[in-house]
Amino acid sequence: LVGRAKIAPGEWILVHAGGSGVGCAAIQIARLFNARVIATASTPEKREKTLELGAEEAIGYEDFPAHVRRITGKRGADVVVDHIGPTTWQQSVSCLTRGGRLVTCGGTTGHEITFDVRHLFFKSLSFLGSTMGTLEELKAVTEHLAAGRLRPVVDSVYRLDEIQEAHRHLESRKAFGKVVVVP
């Protein structure tokens, strides 16, 4: 969000899967930089938790582009964080305002996407890939964590011999935040 998407104060950021580890971090980072956050989540309980993390609005996946247009006064999102992939990609692109940026760090529903290329050039959009950050970014995150401005969100902790149960919990889509496995 900071290094690649270059978020700015007051921008609207759509964070998909607000209850995922990536989503929880993205909500907090966007708010830390005074951006406005709309989070998607699959259940009312998860949506409520995204609001507690700092999202201004929390919506389901049903017709989320219409909700984004309504919330932003028909303007659209400046940035979309979409690590879901094919099931949300085209609609995520349609949510972006002119000059908007879509940043991705994964594809949980698959790795091949299709989209209407006209959106890309007519709206002057940018698609940004991101994986690990720089050493300087790691230091900045560590400082924010130490100061309490960011907090890790851990759903549950499993022992290594409980790995199957940890996987079942993840696959159930009931987790909010990270599922941690320890030796």
Image (spheres, grey):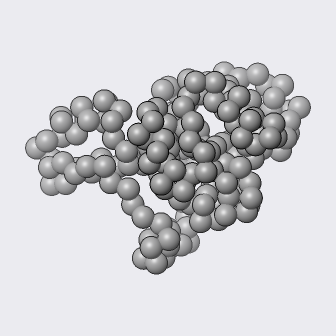
Residue 152: % across, % down: 39, 60
Residue 30: % across, % down: 61, 58
Residue positioned most to the left:
161
Picture residue at 35% right of the left edge, 49% below the top: 178
Q: Nearer the viewer, residue 24 or 48?
A: 48
> Is 112 on the left-hand or right-hand side of 47?
right
Picture residue at 83% right of the left edge, 44% below the top: 99
Q: Which quarter of the rendered picture does the N terminus lie within?
A: bottom right
Residue 50: % across, % down: 49, 48
Residue 17: % across, % down: 50, 39
Based on the displayed image, in which of its 4 quarters is residue 105 positioned?
top right
Q: Is residue 141 visible?
A: yes
> Is 87 on the left-hand or right-hand side of 124?
left
Q: Which quarter of the rendered picture does the C terminus lie within?
A: bottom left
> Is 110 on the left-hand or right-hand side of 102?
left
Picture residue at 59% right of the left edge, 27% below the top: 88
Q: How many marks?
A: 0
Q: Is residue 135 visible?
A: no
Picture residue at 51% right of the left edge, 50% below the top: 51
